[in-house]
Image (cartoon, rainbow, N blue to C red):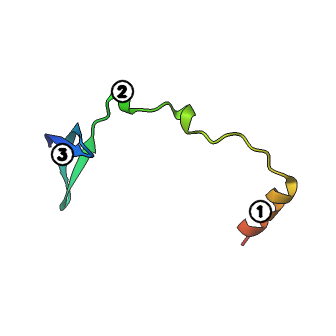
Amino acid sequence: MAVAKEVRSGRERLGLLRVGGDVLVLHAARRPDEIRDLTQLLPPPTEVSHKEIAGALALWAP
């Protein structure tokens, strides 16, 4: 395992580089300013009718 500097899209990041079988694996280290609040990623609430639910269940059934 080694500490590596990754440069992508003009930004530098630290990461851990390790051998995983016959490939190299880079684990990118995240900084606190790069982590977004999960509530920002939630879709807005919507209402679904019974007809839409029945149609979705009909598509799902084997």
Residue 48 at what x, y percent from top left? 80, 50
Please indicate whether residue 7 sits to the left or right of residue 45 in the image: left
Q: Circle 1 is placed at which residue position?
A: 57
25 relative to 33, above or below: below
Distance between the alpha carbons at the discs numbered 1 and 2: 41 Å
Q: Amino acid at mark 3?
A: Leu
Label 1: few (<14), some or many (≥20) within 10 Å?
Answer: few
Please indicate whether residue 10 sits to the left or right of residue 35 in the image: left
Whichever of callouts 2 and 3 sits on the residue coming sooner in the sequence is 3
Q: Which mark identifies residue 21? A: none
Q: Circle 3 is placed at which residue position?
A: 17
Label 3: few (<14), some or many (≥20) within 10 Å?
Answer: some
Outermost residue on the top side: it is: 32
52 relative to 14, above or below: below
Whichever of callouts 1 and 3 sits on the residue coming sooner in the sequence is 3
Outermost residue on the left side: it is: 2
Q: Which mark identifies residue 32? A: 2
Q: Secondary structure at mark 1?
A: helix
Depth order, front residue of 62/40: 40
Residue 44 at what x, y percent from top left? 67, 40
The residue at the point 83 percent across, 61 percent down is 54
